[in-house]
Image: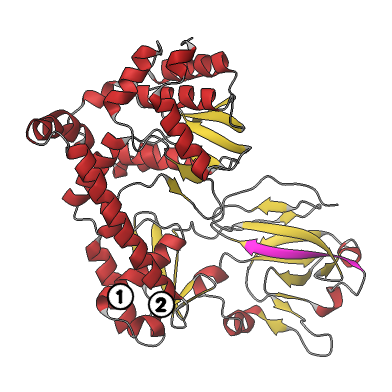
């Protein structure tokens, strides 16, 4: 264990200053622990900061199974976290279904997905200044725009998932290695880091040493440029936010509003729209084609653009973006009081919220078996007792449900009677009366699955 003089090093002070400026006291913080020197140093620094600054620290190691050393890396992380009494979770992922993306991209996507599933306030990543410079140059070589070249931020807030925290962005790789040696830390070496077929490794081993000879301060100057690009990206976001006020509603983008903007401003709004949904940004060619098709589309046009694992579709002059969904399947599930039910394939999740005087009457539902199933054809619902049943074939278009959602939409039956189209309508004779216990049923598709809890 390092002595007190070493533990009070400049690096610990710098990281502590970063943390206290953005992380509230008592927050839960999960370290993405690969076992490499960067993440080992981050874990060590955070462990000692937590002795004086209240933090709930845990760690996650993602086992990709790519390297023959993967098991030993997981064992190393387990032993390391046990030394600090820090909880560690190990997630095994399979890159086989994503191999066509390339091993590096597939591993990164699965790692990010595993981190996003964690129930914590912050995910701490060990990216440092050299990573920042590598990312910026790679993005330039790929022809990225202002946002891409702005590289990584110290703190990135995200919708419905933990915020990303990078407290080492002002620290160089050599400083981390010196800290590790001074504090007698051990780490694992990923043999793939020497493989120069990976673009990042090629830059690290071939390009940057040459740059350092001619431009010794290239890390600082390029990082400064990245911050300038980040400011420009923030200004573009402010402009997009103004345009979005009249163009984006309920996660849908108005094509009519998009047509009123210049090409550059339209692409900026489209980027903002996709970013807010958590979609990966398409390249410039694909984004330009999206804008062209949307702006030139006639009434009722069936636009369907796919990139990576996402899709853009258009309905009633509104654009919608979502992950690619699996085909509809047939199923039948009994509801027995769960707060959430994950449905098969891409049929999404049903949420059941217990309320009073709203939604479906619980006592009425208890009179029969409550079943959930998809549409099979010829379904109808009696929204008003004084009026006849209405077929879903006619009702769903009237409610503005896009065609691609209609086949995935789950339905709630009590016995043989359709009593609820989740999130849209309920049969009047099943509605809860004033002061009566009821349940609100909401549907979300392509949403991550939460932990179910009973409400009955």
Q: Residue furthest bottom?
A: 386
**In the image, what residue occupies the spot 67% across and 74% down?**
424
| Residue 442 forms part of the magenta stretch | yes
| Element on which disc 1 rests | helix
Question: Could you tell me residue 183's position as x and y percent?
Answer: 41, 13
Question: Could you tell me residue 385's position as x and y percent?
Answer: 84, 85
Mark 1 to mark 2: distance in Å? 9 Å
Q: Going by the image, does 271 lie left or right of 248?
A: left
| Residue 92 forms part of the magenta stretch | no
Q: Going by the image, does 212 lie left or right of 75?
A: left
Task: Identify the coloring.
Answer: secondary structure
Q: Nearer the viewer, residue 393 or 92?
A: 92
Write down the residue under mark 1: 265
**In the image, what residue occupies the spot 39% across and 77% down?**
302
Marked residue nearer the N-terminal end (1 or 2): 2
Q: Residue furthest left?
A: 214
- What is the crowding at mark 2: few (fewer than 14 residues within 10 Å), some, or many (at least 20)? some
Q: Nearer the viewer, residue 207 or 428?
A: 207
Q: Main secondary structure of the magenta part?
A: strand
Write down the residue under mark 2: 243
Q: Going by the image, does 381 lie left or right of 182?
A: right
Question: Could you tell me residue 176's position as x and y percent?
Answer: 34, 24
**In the image, what residue occupies the spot 57% across and 50% down?**
448
| Element on which disc 2 rests | helix
Above or below 98: residue 375? below
Disc 1, disc 2: CB below 8 Å? yes
- What is the crowding at mark 1: few (fewer than 14 residues within 10 Å), some, or many (at least 20)? some
Q: Which residues are magenta?
A: 436-443
Q: Nearer the viewer, residue 166 or 379?
A: 166
Can residue 305 be seen by looking at this rendering? no
Q: Going by the image, does 345 lie left or right of 212?
A: right
């Amino acid at each position: 264990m390092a002595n007190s003089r070493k533990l009070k090093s400049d690096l610990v002070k710098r990281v502590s200053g970063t943390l206290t400026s953005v992380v509230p006291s008592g927050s839960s913080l999960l370290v993405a622990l690969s076992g490499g020197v960067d993440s080992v140093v981050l874990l060590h620094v955070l462990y000692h900061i937590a002795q004086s600054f209240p933090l709930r620290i845990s760690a996650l190691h993602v086992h990709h199974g790519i390297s023959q050393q993967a098991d030993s890396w997981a064992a190393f992380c387990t032993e390391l976290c046990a030394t600090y009494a820090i909880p560690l979770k190990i997630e095994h992922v399979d890159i086989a279904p994503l191999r066509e993306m390339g091993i590096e991209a597939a591993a990164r996507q699965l790692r990010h997905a595993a981190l996003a599933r964690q129930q914590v306030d912050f995910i701490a990543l060990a990216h440092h200044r050299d990573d920042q410079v590598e990312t910026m140059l790679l993005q330039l070589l790929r022809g990225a725009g202002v946002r891409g070249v702005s590289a990584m931020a110290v703190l990135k807030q995200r919708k419905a998932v933990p915020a990303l925290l990078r407290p080492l962005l002002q620290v160089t790789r050599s400083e981390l290695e010196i800290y590790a040696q001074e504090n007698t830390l051990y780490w694992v070496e990923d043999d793939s880091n020497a493989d120069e077929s990976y673009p990042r490794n090629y830059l690290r081993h071939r390009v940057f040493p040459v740059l350092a000879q001619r431009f010794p301060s290239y890390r600082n100057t390029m990082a400064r440029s990245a911050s300038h690009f980040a400011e420009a990206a923030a200004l573009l976001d402010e402009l997009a936010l103004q345009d979005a006020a009249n163009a984006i509603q309920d996660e849908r983008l108005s094509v009519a509003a998009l047509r009123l903007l210049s090409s550059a401003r339209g692409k900026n709004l489209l980027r903002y729209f996709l970013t807010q949904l958590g979609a990966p940004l398409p390249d410039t060619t694909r984004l330009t084609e999206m804008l062209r098709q949307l702006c030139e589309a006639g009434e009722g046009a069936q636009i369907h653009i796919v990139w990576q694992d996402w899709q853009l579709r258009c309905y009633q002059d509104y654009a919608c973006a979502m992950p690619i969904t699996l085909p509809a399947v047939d199923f039948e599930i009994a509801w027995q009081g769960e707060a959430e039910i994950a449905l098969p394939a891409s049929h999404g999740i049903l949420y059941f919220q217990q309320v009073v005087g709203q939604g479906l009457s619980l006592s009425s539902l208890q009179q029969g078996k409550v079943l959930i199933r998809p549409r099979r054809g010829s379904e109808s619902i009696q929204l008003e007792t004084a009026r006849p049943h209405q077929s879903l074939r006619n009702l769903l278009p009237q409610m503005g449900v896009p065609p691609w959602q209609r086949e995935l939409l789950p339905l709630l039956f009590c016995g043989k009677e359709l009593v609820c189209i989740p999130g849209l309508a309920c049969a009047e004779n099943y509605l809860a009366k004033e002061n009566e216990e009821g349940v609100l049923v909401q549907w979300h598709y392509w949403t991550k699955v939460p932990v179910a809890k009973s409400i009955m």
